[in-house]
Amino acid sequence: MKEIFLLKLGEIVLKGANKRQFESRLRQNVRRRMKMYGNFDVYLMQSTVYVEPMDEECDVDGAWEACRSIFGVVSLCRCRPCEKDLDAIFDAIENYLGDDLDCAKSFKVESKRSDKRFPLTSIQLSQHIGGRLAEAHPTVEVDVHHPEYTVYVEVRDLAAYVHGPAIPGAGGLPTGVGGRAMCLLSGGIDSPVAAYMIAKRGVEIECVHFFSYPYTSQLAKDKVLELARLVTRYAGRMTVNIVSFTEIQEAIRDNCPEEFFTLIMRRFMMEISQRIAKDDGCGALITGENLGQVASRSITGADLTIPADILDLLRDNLHQYSKLITKVRLRAVSGQARQNVVGKIPEGIWMEMAGALSNLEFRITDIETDGFKVGGFIPIDNYILKDSDIALGEEFVNK
């Protein structure tokens, strides 16, 4: 008989009157995920989802990897079904798991008999099959306490199933049972992780990304879409709303005090996200903000490379606050650089790099901006820059 998958449910089995709703949603999610891998029959019995390939054209390995990332599945195993007969069970183990047994130093058999019409109890079945396997594999010891390999036999209503150790699934609740939420997706790691964690609790995710061309490049938008694709592996289907934010950002720059740039931009982003969420039936916003987060960064051993084209601009803007610029070792680099790297610009211009830089561990080769490798950055508040050289020097030491 062909190989099938057994997907074991987790906390769904603890639900009460609405348990059937959770099981139905999980079955729908598995069926939808299996469509791209061929013709699979997906059905649910005894708190287990069965995934059975119906023809030889099915991509079994691809389907197996997809099942590992479906929320609501706590563990899963590939198994061989057989007749509910002692000889058939033994033959299935020999054919399906014999090579794995030969590679192990010790083994044991664990049985589960959910079909109470089967004549042997679970313990009797384990003893019988274990004894025959010990005779067939004399070089493999029997160790019921700490075996290197465990053979599992499950006698269920439709058939008996033999398999090796199960692997952990994605866990959580089936996507869609907890409503919908809108995630403000940036280029950093926090927002996709937040989307993943919320989706794991059964919430269907929709995303919004604020794109400020030409201040942010097409590469930055592509990165955000790629992050969304990574989340869809677990969260399922996902819509990403791309919002053009350039005009709003420029209006804030021209009409608002510089110290309020970030606050006002965040206010607009929240308002726009709220309206999109309301129109699309989302009941919550996901931002990925982390209360009390403390970033640990170091630039030990890193040389600061500054493009020659902006050295004058850097000096013009930094010398008025500090004389430490004269103590920095500068090295010229050929090439062009944006002139809006520093100066009187809104903080939103940094949105392209902010996500990557804020989570950077300062591996110089990891980040590239405008053709130049970036070793990292140290955020310094304006009030420190305007205070004194001593305060700025202490800030560098503390960072």
Image (cartoon, rainbow, N blue to C red):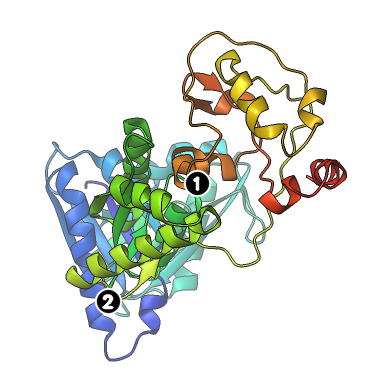
Amino acid type at mark 2: Phe
Q: Residue at x 33, y 42 (%)?
A: 212
Where is residue 7? Give x, y as percent: 33, 61
In this view of the protein, which residue sits in the foreground, 37 or 279? 279
Q: Which residue is mark 2?
A: 22
Q: Earlier in the sequence, mark 2 or mark 1?
A: 2
Question: Is the C-beta separation of discs 2 and 1 under 8 Å?
Answer: no
Q: Residue at x 16, y 44 (%)?
A: 36
| Residue lying farthest to the top in this orientation | 334
| Local crowd size for mark 2, using a 10 Å CA cut-off: few (<14), some (14–19), many (≥20) | many
- Give the CA distance from mark 2 to mark 1: 45 Å
| Residue lying farthest to the bottom in this orientation | 17
Where is residue 394? Give x, y as percent: 86, 45
Where is residue 28? Give x, y as percent: 18, 64
Is 99 drawn above or below residue 11 in the view shown?
Answer: above
In this view of the protein, which residue sits in the foreground, 44 or 379? 379
In the picture provided, is 32 more to the left or to the right than 365? left
Q: Quadrant of the C terminus?
A: top right
Amino acid type at mark 1: Glu
Does residue 168 appear in this view?
no
Q: What secondary structure is found at the residue carrying circle 1? A: helix
Residue 21 sits in quarter: bottom left
Q: What secondary structure is found at the residue carrying circle 2? A: helix
Q: Residue at x 37, y 52 (%)?
A: 68
What number is the disc on residue 347?
A: 1
| Local crowd size for mark 1, using a 10 Å CA cut-off: few (<14), some (14–19), many (≥20) | some
Q: Nearer the viewer, mark 2 or mark 1?
A: 1
What number is the disc on residue 123?
A: none
In the picture provided, is 186 more to the left or to the right than 222? right
Is 362 drawn above or below residue 290 in the view shown?
Answer: above
